[in-house]
Amino acid sequence: MVKQISHPWVPAVAGYAALMVGLLDMVKAVAPRLGHSGMTAWSEALPGIVTTVARATSLVVGILLVMLAHALRRRKVRAWRAVVALLPVSAILSLVHSRPVTAAISLLFLVALLANRREFYALSDPRSRWRALGNLLVFGALDLVLGYVIVSMRPRAVADHPGILDRLEHVVLGLVGIEGPVTFTAPRVGDLVYFSLLALGTLTAVTTVYLALRPERPVAELTDQDESRLRELLDRHGARDSLGYFALRRDKSVVFSPSGKAAIAYRVVSGVMLASGDPIGDREAWPAAIRVFMTEARRHAWVPAVIGCGETGGEVWTREAGLSALEIGDEAVVEVADFTLEGRAMRNVRQMANRTERAGYTCLVRRVGDLTEDEKERIRAASASWRGAETERGFSMALGRFGDPADGRCVVVTAHKDGEIRAVLHFVPWGPRGISLDLMRRDRDADPGLNELLIVKTLQAAPAMGVAQVSLNFAMFRAALARGERLGAGPVLRAWRGLLLFLSQWFQIESLYRFNAKFRPIWEPRFVVYPHARDLPRIGVSALQAEAFITLGRPRLRRGSPRLVGNEAAPLA
């Protein structure tokens, strides 16, 4: 359990102090003329100046302190240990250089950190320690080899013909910004060697510290035991949330309440502990599961967040965890008993479905458990070919697999023409009487209106399958789009709607709302739950990464590229 926080301001003060000292060190290193101003006195009176042998050493120490500052603010125990180990060295070096004031401040800072050691408890990824060590060893070996080459590449500029050990000693000292025993007859060559060695050492130190202190990014994995427990909870309480079945994604982790009667599935992305939908299980046990979730987030200094939770779930999250909620869109839910193609309001859907059916398309609505392995493979192959090189999307409203024997109650709807599969819908169970859209994918060369036909056939076949509710796509900011186009909408609302329409060129915001609205659904609001407003940009980026709208290293946003938001793994067109 995480210990009670008695002084929550301590990590912030320690972090900002380390940041200030680091910046002063860096400024002093790159702009030495500032040393004649009053800034020098402040820089030398603050902890963190490990040595003043060279400007470069101040630069290295400044970079490390800046990196440690962020980790200190996030309560990282490794950062605390690093600073505690650094401060005695700083004090000793200050005494050597006759700076008793700096030494005293360093020791006072050390005492303060030791007295408040319980404030720094956040864990890092256990694997990152070994990666940091491996990085240090590999880069250290490369530094020695490259450094020796750098020192020896201008033999005519080297004085007194130093031996191999002298050259290696010069490299080792140069990596930390200290002049070694090798002297150069040409000052420019000496400066080039000096700063080249310093650059190698700085790169090694920065990458090693980054690996040691970076936020934990554990491998999200749903174990067989966790999956079995989740399925038991879904069997009893799965009707509460249409997104509950998506907790069975096998790239999610899960925490359970102490009683085992409730669970929360999540994934850690860029330091954000991201859950989706409402907690699973007995509502009475939701608060206990939320407390376990929040405790785990605090242990690792993750930002807790929930995307796509319902109104009931949002109320429990905000009450039990002290978080805030913001409506981000609406889920389209169609009541099967109320669905009809009759009437003027359904004329567009009726005409498109009839026209597509007359073009020679036939549809099959089946449980996945009723398919043969050959049929499953044909559907997989067709779906993969339509997706092409596009990234598989989904986190909160996508299962990420098809045809698994454990998912026999899922529903698959296929459109056929001339003996070929031309489109696929895939639904996951939503309790005993509902299904929730997971996948919508079609051949890009298929006729317009095919998706409308598939959904109509699904709704018409639902009663025979015992399905009373069908959850369609999630429409981002649906309420803003609907209200912004009404007569009398204010300038702020119209401006917000205009921005959403602009973003719809990359994300299917408006088109998905229009598509869902054709089926006269009930709109169920969905929320994002977050700690502070300042965390929203970070949570938004993490959510986009989790949904694979942002993939690091590859540009994914292209103007005009169609996308589904929410229950999506393929484009509408």
Image (cartoon, grey):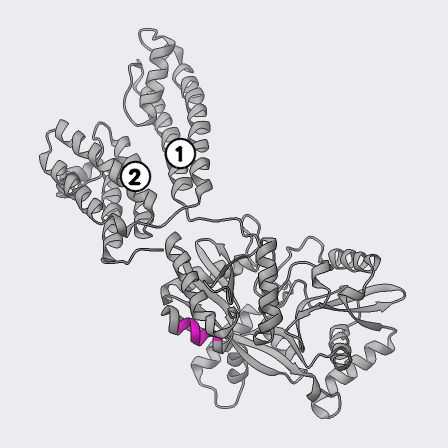
Query: Helix or strand or loop: what does disc 2 sit on?
Result: helix
Where is the C terminus found, in terms of image quarters?
bottom right
Quarter-wise, where is residue 513 in the image? bottom right
Q: In the visual, does 45 lie left or right of 341?
A: left
Residue occupied by mark 1: 203
Residue 170, percent from left and from top? 33, 18
Note whether residue 505 is visible.
no
Q: Which residues are drawn in magenta? A: 313-318
At a point 28% along the width and 36% down the height, the residue shown is 61
Note whether residue 420 is visible.
yes
Task: Identify the mark nearer the N-term, 1 or 2.
Answer: 2
Residue occupied by mark 2: 82
Residue 434 is a magenta residue = no
Foreground of the two, 562 or 208: 208
- Residue at the extreme bottom: 343
Is the residue marked by circle 2 packed among few (<14), some (14-19), or many (20+) residues within 10 Å? some
| Numbered disc in front, either 1 or 2 | 2
- Mark 2 residue type: Ala
Q: In the visual, does 171 lie left or right of 130?
A: left
Q: In the visual, does 213 lie left or right of 511?
A: left
Is the residue marked by circle 1 packed among few (<14), some (14-19), or many (20+) residues within 10 Å? some
Q: Is residue 250 above or below residue 41?
A: below
Q: Is residue 197 above or below residue 7?
A: above
